[in-house]
Image (tube, grey):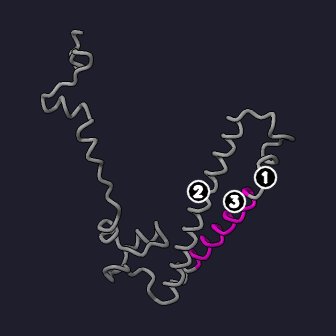
Amino acid sequence: MENVKSKLLAKKRELEQVIARKKDDLMIPITESTDELSMYDQHPADVGSELYEREKDAGLLEMMELELQKLNDALNRYDKGQYGICSICGDPIEPKRLERLLNTTQCIQCARKTRDNFTRPAEEDITFSGAMSDRGETLEIAGYDFYDSDN
């Protein structure tokens, strides 16, 4: 089991280094990162592209910080002797799952039960034209059947 703790610590160090580099990159003013003396003569689309990249990096940084928090939680669970035990049902977490997701706290059965199930909006049942033709209904545009190939 000590091998598990060393893997968790190695992953934590790696993530902390990436987070530190990301934070350093985000601290550089936008004028320096584009190598321009003035932002006045820049086309708005060029600045927009740079802003988009910065916001994407900020989102990635937030995701990495959440991952670091999960790793710290996994280390705490290890120290308490709870690592590898499902936090919901109390059964052991599958070894292959732990190998793939070092910081998981749920067995596969509980993870499947608790994952977010996205349900499509009710409007899509009405607006999906392929479903209309499947039911024998037609979609008319300017008095012509949309699916009629003779027109």
* Residue 126, x across and y down, in percent: 23, 38
Point out the tag, 3 or 2, that comes first from the N-terminus: 3
Rendered residue at 23%/13% (across/down): 149
Q: Does dot 1 land on a helix, a strand or a loop?
A: loop
The quarter in which the C terminus is drawn is top left
Residue, disc 2 = 59
Rendered view: 117 above or below 131: below
Asked if the magenta segment contains residue 148, the reply would be: no
Amino acid type of disc 3?
Answer: Lys
In this rendering, position of residue 91 left or right of residue 37: left
- The quadrant where residue 88 appears: bottom left
Amino acid type of disc 2?
Answer: Gly
Query: Is the Cβ of the residue at disc 1 closer than 8 Å to that at disc 3?
Result: no
Please state the extent of the stretch shown in magenta in the rendering: 6-26
> Comparing marks 1 and 3, which lies closer to the viewer?
1
Q: Give the Cα separation between the discs numbered 1 and 3.
A: 14 Å
| Circle 1 residues within 10 Å: few <14, some 14–19, many ≥20 | few
Front-lying residue, 95 or 26? 26
Amino acid type of disc 1?
Answer: Pro
Residue 22 numbered mark, or none: 3
Q: Give the Cα separation between the discs numbered 1 and 2.
A: 18 Å
> Comparing marks 3 and 2, which lies closer to the viewer?
2
Q: Does dot 2 land on a helix, a strand or a loop?
A: helix
Front-lying residue, 34 or 85? 34
Residue, disc 1 = 29
Asked if the magenta segment contains residue 16, the reply would be: yes
Q: Does dot 3 land on a helix, a strand or a loop?
A: helix
Point out the tag, 1 or 3, that comes first from the N-terminus: 3
> Comparing marks 1 and 2, which lies closer to the viewer?
1
* Residue 19, x across and y down, in percent: 67, 64
* Residue 137, x across and y down, in percent: 15, 28
